Image: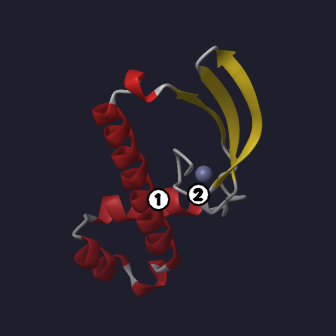
Amino acid sequence: MKCYHCGSDTRVMDTRAQADLAVARRRKCEDPTCARSFVTFEGYAGAVNRKRLRAMADSARARWALRTRDRIIFRELHLGWQSLAARYRLTKTSIYLAARRGAASLKVKT
Ligand SMILES: [Zn+2]
């Protein structure tokens, strides 16, 4: 299972029976810059809302894509905000904010 925050692979740290038909798994993101922990539940598929699961997966992918873009913007600031603004169709302020998020997710001090 991928990390809900960054989309990286995760490792199962712990598995516990939650009820007769369900287990809870504690997972940890394997990307050391993210390293988030979270719990997933596994249960009888008849009880799962597939539409909602798909929506959750889509939003995790979207967050991962945005974070990757922000990191690239931070790394390419030397190109100048004008060329980045043109490439990503963002304003100067959005480029600045994206670069700050990118730096934060890379754990770089600004
Ligand atoms: Zn992660």
SS assignment at label 2: helix
Q: Nearer the viewer, residue 106 or 64?
A: 64
At 35% from the left and 76% from the top, the residue drawn is: 81
Q: Which quadrant of the view contains residue 80?
A: bottom left
Q: Nearer the viewer, residue 63 or 51?
A: 51
What residue occupies the far bottom of the structure in this picture?
Answer: 79
In this view, 22 is above or below 71: above
SS assignment at label 1: helix
Q: Position of residue 37 (x, y in %)?
A: 68, 39
- The mark that comes first in sequence, 2 or 1, is 1
Amino acid type of the residue tagged 2 in the rendering: Ser
Classify 10 Å Cα crowding around label 2: few (below 14), some (14-19), many (20 and above): some
Res. 95 mark: none
Q: Position of residue 86 (x, y in %)?
A: 23, 78
At 59% from the left and 57% from the top, the residue drawn is: 105
Discs 2, 1 touching: Cβ within 8 Å: yes
Amino acid type of the residue tagged 1 in the rendering: Arg
Q: Which residue is mark 1?
A: 67
Q: Left or right: 12 with respect to 8?
A: right
Q: Position of residue 19 (x, y in %)?
A: 64, 13
Q: Which quadrant of the view contains residue 85?
A: bottom left
